[in-house]
Image (cartoon, helix red, strand yellow):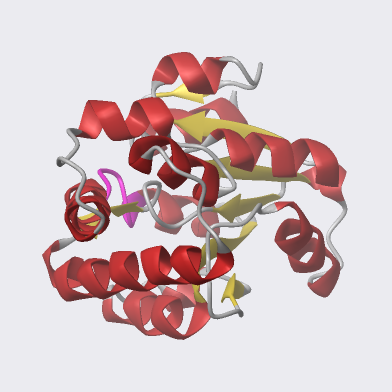
Amino acid sequence: MISHVVWDWNGTLLNDNDAVLAAVNAVCVDFGRASLTWAEWQAVYARPMRVSYEEILERLLDDEEWARVDKLYHERYDALLHTCGLAGGVPAELRRWAESGRTQSLLSMWFHDRLVPTIEQFELTGYFSRIDGLAGDVGGGSKTDSLLRHLEAQDLDPADVVLIGDVVDDAVAAESAGTGCVLVTTGAMTRTALETTGVPVTSSIQEAVQLLDD
């Protein structure tokens, strides 16, 4: 019986695809590369993110260049954050899960100091037993270590937990931590890519939560 959900944020609970693509293309412009379509970005999306950018920019990036990419991306993304809304089914599904007596938390690889006030603006903070974002200054890494710390901080048994996210790295992190995983096709990766993980893949938050009740 699953008693706890760990939610991803960007691309899962937050519909930020347009802002993501605009931010990616800000990097492309700065590096003299033609803009991408959403399908082209989905085709190269991977973690660590540095790999994705090296593919689209057709060059290896040193640490200084990667820091520049990350800064360009987040400056443009932050400027467009106000245009993003919640994914379909949020917050109704968060409320329903809480009312069932089960618990939920949020783990994101977005910067913690930007994540927390954004969730507060959407009036979702009260649904989560814990909110963890990225503590460092440069993003783009794997979620595995963060998930392990997130579970340990809440004294959660991984067997009772499902991570709901939108990218392959969520499934990789869940497998490493011993939790279940359900992926949604609402974010940065195609259904075909998500299905390679072998975990359930759904089209919406509502479908993902329904799987946990079946």
Left or right of residue 166, residue 117 in this image: left
Q: Is residue 125 covered in magenta?
A: no
Furthest residue toward left: 83
Q: Which residue occupies the foreground of this view, 210 or 116?
A: 116
Q: Which residue occupies the foreground of this view, 176 or 208?
A: 176
Residue 117 versus residue 149 in the image, above or below: below
Residue 111 versus residue 117 in the image, above or below: above
Left or right of residue 17, residue 93 in this image: right
Q: Position of residue 37 (x, y in %)?
A: 17, 33
Residue ID at (42%, 58%): 95
Main secondary-structure element of the magenta-colored stretch: loop
Residue ID at (42%, 46%): 53
Left or right of residue 103, residue 40 in this image: left
- Within the image, what quadrant is residue 58 found in? top left
Q: Which residue occupies the foreground of this view, 162 or 16?
A: 16
Residue 212 versus residue 125 in the image, above or below: above
What residue range appears in magenta?
87-92
